[in-house]
């Protein structure tokens, strides 16, 4: 059992929730759950995300040690993103949340 309590204002777990509890972070982690992706492949897979937002989300997830960026030795040079072990451990709860959202989208208010 953890000594953290998300109800406390200074709880470090809140920082963790802030890292992963937004739409784009969940979608990016879910997308990378299918394996490593090049930036352009990930952008094409995720409808509606801008280049700026994808870049910001990937950088945030990198800083949180959930995603790893690897430079590819290709011409032209490219990069690939993959989940770290920590990111992989997040995949199951994110997948459950994503599937729940898909199953209940019609029941939720659209305000």
Image (cartoon, rainbow, N blue to C red):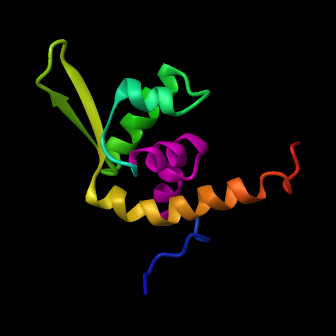
Indicate the quadrant containing the N terminus: top left, top right, bottom left or bottom right.
bottom left
Task: Give the vertical position of 111 relative to 84 (above or below).
Answer: above
The image position of residue 94, as x and y in percent, is: 52, 59
Residue at screen point 53% across, 59% down? 95
Indicate the quadrant containing the C terminus: top left, top right, bottom left or bottom right.
top right
Residue 10 in view of the camera: no
The image position of residue 3, as x and y in percent, is: 43, 81
Apparent side of residue 59 relative to residue 14 in the rendered image (left or right): left
Residue at screen point 50% across, 52% down? 20
The image position of residue 84, as x and y in percent, is: 27, 53
Apparent side of residue 40 relative to residue 96 in the rendered image (left or right): left
Q: Quadrant of residue 110?
A: top right
Q: Which residues are magenta?
A: 13-32
Between 95 and 62, the one nearer to me in the picture: 95
Apparent side of residue 38 relative to residue 91 in the rendered image (left or right): left
Residue at screen point 39% across, 49% down? 34
Q: Quadrant of residue 79?
A: top left
Apparent side of residue 106 relative to residue 43 in the rendered image (left or right): right
Residue 81 in view of the camera: yes
């Amino acid at each position: 059992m953890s000594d953290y309590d998300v109800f406390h204002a200074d709880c470090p777990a809140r920082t963790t929730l802030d890292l992963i509890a937004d739409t784009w972070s969940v979608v990016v982690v879910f997308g990378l759950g299918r394996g490593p992706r090049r930036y352009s492949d990930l952008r094409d897979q995720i409808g509606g995300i801008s280049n700026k937002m994808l870049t910001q989300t990937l950088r945030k997830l990198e800083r949180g040690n959930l995603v790893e960026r690897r430079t590819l030795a290709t011409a032209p040079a490219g990069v690939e993103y993959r989940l770290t072990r920590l990111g992989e451990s997040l995949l199951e709860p994110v997948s459950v949340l994503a599937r729940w959202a898909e199953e209940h989208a019609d029941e939720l208010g659209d305000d």
